[in-house]
């Protein structure tokens, strides 16, 4: 493709779509130009910043025609922070765009012709995150800063408030960072590998109100620990657990391998629907409990359980979907490669009094075939894989073992479309796809697909 424009050109463009990270897409003679801060349907005069062989980047000089769905972003940090990408798009507009995005991906990547329903959104799409992972650092003046990273950088936007997280997390960013500065707690510097405090993680049980604060430190020895515990309890009266996690590695990974409780309980509790969960510092637990219930109810609806079915839950994590299914299934077996998650799943099953569940640690593509050889066949198989989608060996296992129904819970429409194509080529038919908005004001969208074994 020849490049029809060059750096520093000025031109007028029409915005056709958004990318997965929220940039507008315009095309000049078929050449894609990515532009921050614009919306589909808008016309803008732009300045070309960079051109590559297959695409380029530009910035807005002037908006000429604005979208009817454009709104003023309510967050003062929106232009800097990389946490949200769509606050300038009305919530109704976000839901319409997400439905079209999922539908287009299904057709373009997966050649899937099943209906994609309107996105199930939130009545109140703010303050929904029950977990915040807040990095700490030191600014050029030597002061403590805390917030979230700028887009595609490790530079922290010093923040006092985030409109999609809890008030307790805001307290950490606004008040605790100043108190820690006074107490002489030095933030970690990833370049010099010096300093103590790397992150503060805040988790809250929406149904219970219980709060856990996790201090992620470079070293186990934390001289100011007693003073910090006292200050956290003063600032967050409903805190029930203060935990230290030690990460001494030169890495961008948040948690280290060693975790211990400084004060209070080892876990907090929350409920999704009628199911209770114990949540530890490193447990995987969906960050939007309101929409998690919507998502799991959709999976349960697609499973069409009558009380006798044997269900296998691949990628079961701490058993959250498994236990939802166990309310109506005859028996549920969950498999997950992370051993600690399986221990959490067993504990949560016991907490809820479920006796019709079984959990085993190991790769799903190895464990499930063995279960089948042992006569543990499934009527319904549920998968909830990470963003990269299902392991190819697991997809082959599903096709070989032929459970009559598959429910696929996805956090990435692109890998969902790819995997549905493989399953359809292997004898399944996608009946419908239901997107669920788990992360309002971002470009992320989850979806649940229902597949039946073709006759």
Image (cartoon, rainbow, N blue to C red):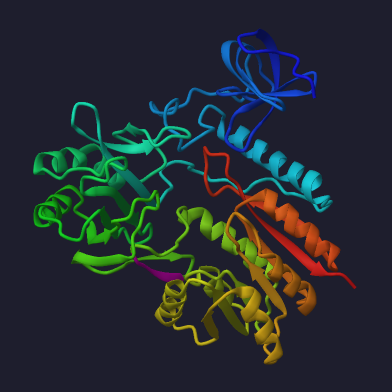
Q: Residue furthest front?
A: 192
- Residue drawn at x 59%, y 81% is 333
Q: Quadrant of the C terminus?
A: bottom right
Of the pair 292 and 393, the residue shown nearer to us: 393
Residue 338 drawn above or below residue 82: below
Residue 113 drawn above or below residue 300: above
Of the pair 234 and 388, the residue shown nearer to us: 388
Q: Quadrant of residue 410 in the image?
A: bottom right
> Can see residue 345?
yes
Residue 233 drawn above or below residue 3: below
* Relative side of 194 to 31, left or right: left
Residue 370 drawn above or below residue 298: below
- Residue drawn at x 69%, y 70% is 394
Residue 329 percent across, percent down from the top left? 62, 80
Q: Is residue 120 magenta?
A: no
Q: Quadrant of residue 373 in the image?
A: bottom right
Q: Which residues are magenta?
A: 275-280
- Residue drawn at x 45%, y 38% is 83
- Residue drawn at x 19%, y 53% is 237
Residue 49 percent across, percent down from the top left? 58, 16
> Can see residue 162?
no
Of the pair 197 and 77, the residue shown nearer to us: 197
Please tell me how many numbered marks the rendered image carries: 0
Q: Quadrant of the N terminus?
A: top right
Q: Residue furthest right?
A: 455
Query: What is the chief secondary structure element of the magenta stretch?
Result: strand
Residue 404 percent across, percent down from the top left? 78, 75
Q: Quadrant of residue 188 in the image?
A: top left
* Relative side of 7 to 245, left or right: right
Residue 180 percent across, percent down from the top left? 15, 43
């Amino acid at each position: 493709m020849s490049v029809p424009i060059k750096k520093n050109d000025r031109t007028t463009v029409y915005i056709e779509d958004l990318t997965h990270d929220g940039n507008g897409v315009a095309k000049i003679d078929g050449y894609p130009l990515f532009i921050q801060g614009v919306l589909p349907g808008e016309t803008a005069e732009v300045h070309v910043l960079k051109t590559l062989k297959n695409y380029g980047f530009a910035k807005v000089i002037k908006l000429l025609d604005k979208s009817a769905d454009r709104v003023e972003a309510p967050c003062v940090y929106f232009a800097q922070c990389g946490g949200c990408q769509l606050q300038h798009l009305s919530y109704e507009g976000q839901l319409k765009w997400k439905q079209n995005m999922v539908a287009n991906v299904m057709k373009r990547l997966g050649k899937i012709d099943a209906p994609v329903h309107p996105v199930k959104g939130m009545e109140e799409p703010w303050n929904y995150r029950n977990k915040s992972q807040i990095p700490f650092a030191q600014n050029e003046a030597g002061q403590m800063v805390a917030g979230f990273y700028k887009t595609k950088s490790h530079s922290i936007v010093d923040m006092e408030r985030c409109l999609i997280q809890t008030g307790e997390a805001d307290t950490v960013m606004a008040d605790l960072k100043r108190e820690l500065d006074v107490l002489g707690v030095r933030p970690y510097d990833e370049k010099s590998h010096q300093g103590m405090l790397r992150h503060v993680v805040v988790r809250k049980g929406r149904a219970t109100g219980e709060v856990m604060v996790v201090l992620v430190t470079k070293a186990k020895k934390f001289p100011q620990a007693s003073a910090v515990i006292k200050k956290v309890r003063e600032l967050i009266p409903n805190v029930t657990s203060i935990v230290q996690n030690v990460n001494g590695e030169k890495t961008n990974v948040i948690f280290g391998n060693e975790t211990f409780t400084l004060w209070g309980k080892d876990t907090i509790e929350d409920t999704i629907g009628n199911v209770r969960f114990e949540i530890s510092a490193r447990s995987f637990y969906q960050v939007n409990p309101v929409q998690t219930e919507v998502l799991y109810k959709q999976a349960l609806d697609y499973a069409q359980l009558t009380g006798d079915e044997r269900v296998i839950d691949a990628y079961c994590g701490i058993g959250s979907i498994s236990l939802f299914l166990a309310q109506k299934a005859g028996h549920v077996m969950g498999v997950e490669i992370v051993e600690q998650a399986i221990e959490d799943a067993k504990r949560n099953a016991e907490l809820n009094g479920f006796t019709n569940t079984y959990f085993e640690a190991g790769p799903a593509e190895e464990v499930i075939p063995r279960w089948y050889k042992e006569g543990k066949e499934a009527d319904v198989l549920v998968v909830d894989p990470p963003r990269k989608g299902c392991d190819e060996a697991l997809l082959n296992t599903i096709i070989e073992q032929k459970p009559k129904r598959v429910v696929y819970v996805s956090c990435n429409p692109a890998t969902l479309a790819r995997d549905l194509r493989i399953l359809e080529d292997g004898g399944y038919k996608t009946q419908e796809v239901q997107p669920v908005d788990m992360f309002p004001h971002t470009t992320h969208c989850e979806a649940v697909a229902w597949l039946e074994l073709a006759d």
